[in-house]
């Protein structure tokens, strides 16, 4: 039996939409219903992200091409040391998200982050971002190399709750999840955004990660397949959660926790409604 991530509410703010804890500064944010808060992905080197336009929304669909913009692990570590995230740690459990452009960067960012991991409930590794030319989902194209990477990270962090964030592209997601479990990882987040293309109002073509309610059936199937193959792995379900019923569906097909992403852009109080519903559902 793999270890569990103990949360007061199995509701997690997804990496990306939550930024680096900006919601912690909003008055009236429903923290009583937040089980954990995942920070934006931190990479070994600083990333400035893609040039605008970076995001477009239409008819409930959203495409983003932010490009993993972040300060890099050195500057991020300095802000941790200076206590700039203490206000977030005081409100909820925090999950660190790490990424890299290649095998070695994943290892190096792990080593740089290691001294600070006692602050975090878990570390989620982003193996599925569709908005960057290197790293992200490209790291899983060589299955042997990726499994070696999983083993090496686990060896480096033997006592850390490790979560692999997986996408649906490149193969069957349950097979990727199985590789993570075989390497001793505790959990998986399924799914990430998927590659999409849209034209905005200025007729500019945007290639990026597609999100929105349309992802819910895809996420539900992914959770179902992973749970069927791996009864014990911890599953964070992510994708298309906008309503109370969406979260309930994902729990019914095998999720241990539900992650909310783009929905909080529209209304952060969705956390209150969905969190409350999850607790009521779990009492049945």
Image (cartoon, rainbow, N blue to C red):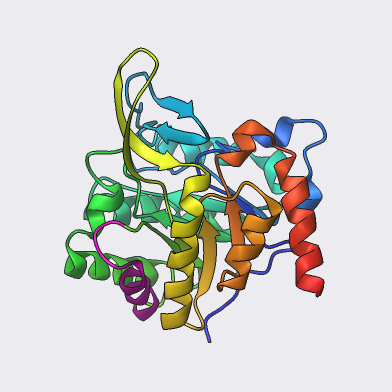
Across and down, in percent, residue 179 comes to 32, 74
Q: Residue at x 28, y 38 (%)?
A: 132
Determine if residue 214 is in view.
Answer: yes
Across and down, in percent, residue 229 comes to 41, 82
Across and down, in percent, residue 83 comes to 64, 38
The image shows residue 40, relative to residue 107, as above or below, that is above
Task: Give the overall secondary structure of the magenta segment.
Answer: helix
**Does 198 sit left or right of 216 as displayed?**
left
Q: Is residue 177 magenta?
A: yes
Q: Which residues are magenta?
A: 169-182
Residue lying furthest top in this view? 202
The image shows residue 114, relative to residue 13, as above or below, that is below
Closer to the camera in the image, 166 or 84: 166
Q: Residue at x 39, y 31 (%)?
A: 66
Across and down, in percent, residue 48 comes to 36, 26
Closer to the camera in the image, 117 or 58: 58
The quadrant of the image that shows the C terminus is: bottom right
- Determine which quarter of the picture holds residue 127: bottom left
Determine if residue 91 is in view.
Answer: no
**Does 234 sit left or right of 247 as displayed?**
left
Q: Is residue 66 magenta?
A: no
């Amino acid at each position: 039996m793999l270890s569990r991530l103990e949360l007061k509410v199995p509701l997690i703010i997804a990496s990306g939409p939550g930024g680096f804890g900006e919601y912690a500064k909003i008055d009236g944010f429903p923290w009583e219903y937040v089980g954990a808060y995942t920070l934006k992905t931190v990479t070994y080197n600083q990333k400035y992200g893609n040039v605008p336009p970076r995001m477009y929304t239409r008819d409930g669909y959203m495409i983003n091409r932010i490009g993993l913009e972040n300060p890099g692990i050195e500057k991020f570590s300095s802000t941790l040391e200076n206590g700039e995230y203490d206000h977030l740690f005081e409100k909820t459990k925090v999950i660190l998200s790490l990424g890299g452009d290649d095998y070695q960067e994943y290892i190096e960012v792990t080593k740089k982050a290691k001294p600070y991991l006692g602050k975090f409930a878990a570390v989620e590794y982003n193996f599925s971002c569709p908005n960057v030319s290197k790293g992200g989902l490209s790291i899983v194209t060589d299955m042997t190399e990726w499994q070696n990477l999983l083993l090496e990270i686990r060896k480096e962090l033997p006592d850390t709750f490790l979560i692999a964030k997986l996408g649906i592209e490149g193969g069957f997601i349950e097979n990727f999840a199985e590789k993570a479990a075989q390497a001793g990882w505790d959990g998986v987040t399924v799914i990430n955004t998927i590659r999409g293309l849209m034209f905005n109002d200025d007729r500019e073509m945007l290639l990026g990660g597609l999100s929105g309610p349309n992802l819910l059936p895809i996420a539900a199937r992914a959770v179902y397949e992973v749970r069927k193959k791996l009864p014990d792995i911890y599953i964070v379900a992510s994708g298309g959660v906008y309503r109370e019923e969406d979260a309930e569906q994902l729990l019914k097909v095998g999720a241990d926790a539900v992650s909310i992403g783009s929905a909080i852009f529209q209304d952060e109080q969705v956390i209150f409604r969905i969190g409350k519903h999850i607790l009521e559902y779990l009492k049945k």
